């Protein structure tokens, strides 16, 4: 009997422990399942949050459409011709319609731009009612330009005033114009009495020597020293221009242009066509530089203002701006190495050289190396031929626009 009771007691204890163990196991199972479920939910939440979280501005993939309505105001001696070659190649490869001057590759810069100075008032081949691009030398006049290229993005380029002035003084041979070409440093001599010498220069050259960038951008050259007129000009340009490039930061400028126009980096590749010889450069002392800045007050204020807006645009571009600049420079170097003989040039005149194109250079390379005047001539020739097409040919052109055989083109 004692053994039976003892055995029963042990059984009860064993059963009790078994029940408790099962309960604990069941409880732990619920906790583990809940924890697992919570962990899985958190991972999903974290994944969704990471995927949907705002990214740095530059890293976002923003859907946009490339802009093809463009007005580019070329300023003198600011890398504007190299910049223009980018617009020319882009427009040519897409069969866009260029608004061209009647004569040469300049509009009359002594007068504000007028649509009446166009070679043709409408694009050839009935492509559209309006032109897509105007990028020839002209004096900025917004109302008239809007008639030619409506809904356009307006772009120009500027340069450090001292560097630009020295380049213009040499390029346009101002020393010869004022009888200083035999002086050891004609620019230094000129800046001793600039007002005296500039009066000897007539026509277009005289107008664009002082504050040359501002005058091209519509500034009245009679108010060179008028602060109110200068500030009014800058305020107007700040409202009307979409992007002001700076040639002192050329590659950075083109990356900003990529974003502004929703283009690809490959659309912005270029080859500098003219390299000025060192012997044709004027040395500039600090005292001469100071005189240049004082005499070109409007250009100085223009540059200072848009230099500030330039870096604001860089900041708003996003965290990958400099990554894009590095990528662009890599692609640019590859493109140039494919197109030209590196470190080899050929003389085009007594003062400039141009890169030597490789014998096996691609059509895209040849297109990039065509100079501004040649490009204008070919586009004008093509436009003239298109205007002389028969009605049947014009009808065909509406569905398939054929390019002139003398142009390089992509496959």
Image: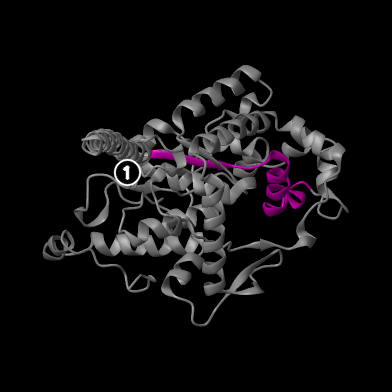
Instruction: Return the x and y of residue 276 as percentages of the image width and height.
Output: 70, 61
Looking at the image, which residue sits at the far top?
A: 228
What is the quadrant of residue 301 in the picture? top right
Looking at the image, which residue sits at the far bottom?
A: 359
**Quadrant holding the N terminus:** top left
Q: Nearer the viewer, residue 282 or 83?
A: 83
Instruction: Return the x and y of residue 274 as percentages of the image width and height.
Output: 62, 62
Q: Is residue 347 above or below residue 318?
A: below
Q: Is residue 177 magenta?
A: yes
- Label 1 sits on residue: 64
Q: Is residue 235 magenta?
A: no
Q: Nearer the viewer, residue 206 or 215?
A: 215
| Label 1 Cα neighbours within 10 Å, binned few <14 / some 14-19 / many ≥20 | few
Residue at 71% x, 63% y: name it.
Answer: 351
Asked if one can make out residue 104 in the rendered structure from this viewpoint, the answer is no
Instruction: Return the x and y of residue 231 as percentages of the image width and height.
Output: 59, 21
Looking at the image, which residue sits at the far front?
A: 1
Q: How is the image coloured?
A: one colour
Q: Nearer the viewer, residue 65 or 360?
A: 65
Q: Is residue 68 left or right of residue 16?
A: right
Helix, strand or loop at disc 1?
Answer: loop
Residue at 42% x, 63% y: name it.
Answer: 377
Q: Which residues are magenta?
A: 153-178
Q: Is residue 229 above or below residue 340?
A: above
């Amino acid at each position: 009997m004692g053994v039976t009771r003892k055995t029963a007691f042990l059984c009860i204890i064993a059963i009790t422990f078994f029940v408790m163990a099962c309960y604990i196991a069941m409880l732990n199972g619920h906790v583990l399942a809940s924890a697992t479920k919570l962990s899985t939910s958190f991972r999903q939440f974290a994944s969704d949050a990471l995927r949907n979280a705002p990214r740095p501005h530059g890293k976002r993939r923003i859907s946009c459409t490339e802009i093809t309505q463009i007005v580019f105001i070329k300023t003198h001696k600011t890398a504007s011709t190299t910049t223009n070659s980018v617009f020319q190649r882009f427009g040519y490869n897409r069969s866009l319609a260029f608004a061209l001057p009647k004569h040469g590759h300049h509009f009359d810069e002594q007068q504000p731009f007028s649509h009446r100075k166009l070679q043709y008032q409408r694009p050839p081949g009935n492509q559209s009612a309006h032109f897509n691009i105007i990028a020839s030398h002209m004096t900025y006049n917004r109302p008239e330009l809007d008639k030619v290229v409506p809904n356009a993005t307006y772009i120009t380029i500027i340069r450090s005033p001292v560097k630009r002035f020295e380049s213009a003084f040499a390029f346009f041979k101002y020393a010869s114009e004022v009888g200083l070409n035999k002086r050891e440093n004609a620019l230094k001599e000129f800046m001793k009495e600039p007002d005296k010498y500039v009066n000897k220069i007539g026509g277009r050259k005289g107008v664009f020597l002082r504050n040359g960038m501002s005058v091209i951008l519509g500034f009245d050259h009679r108010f060179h020293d008028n602060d109110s007129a200068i500030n009014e000009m800058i305020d107007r340009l700040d409202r009307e221009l979409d992007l002001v490039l700076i040639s002192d930061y050329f590659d950075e400028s083109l990356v900003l242009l990529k974003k502004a126009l929703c283009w690809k980096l490959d659309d912005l590749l270029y080859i500098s066509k003219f390299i000025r010889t060192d012997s044709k450069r004027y040395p500039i002392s600090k005292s001469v530089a100071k005189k240049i800045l004082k005499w070109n007050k409007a250009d100085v204020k223009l540059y200072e203002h848009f230099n500030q807006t330039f870096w604001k645009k860089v900041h708003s571009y996003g965290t990958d701006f400099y990554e894009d600049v590095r990528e662009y420079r890599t692609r640019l170097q590859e493109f140039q190495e494919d197109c030209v003989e590196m470190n080899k040039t050929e003389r085009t005149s007594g003062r400039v050289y141009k890169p030597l194109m490789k014998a096996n250079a691609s059509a895209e390379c040849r297109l990039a190396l065509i100079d501004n005047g040649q490009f204008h001539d070919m586009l004008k020739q093509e436009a003239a031929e298109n205007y002389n097409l028969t009605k049947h040919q014009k009808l065909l052109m509406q569905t398939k626009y054929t390019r002139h055989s003398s142009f390089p083109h992509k496959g």
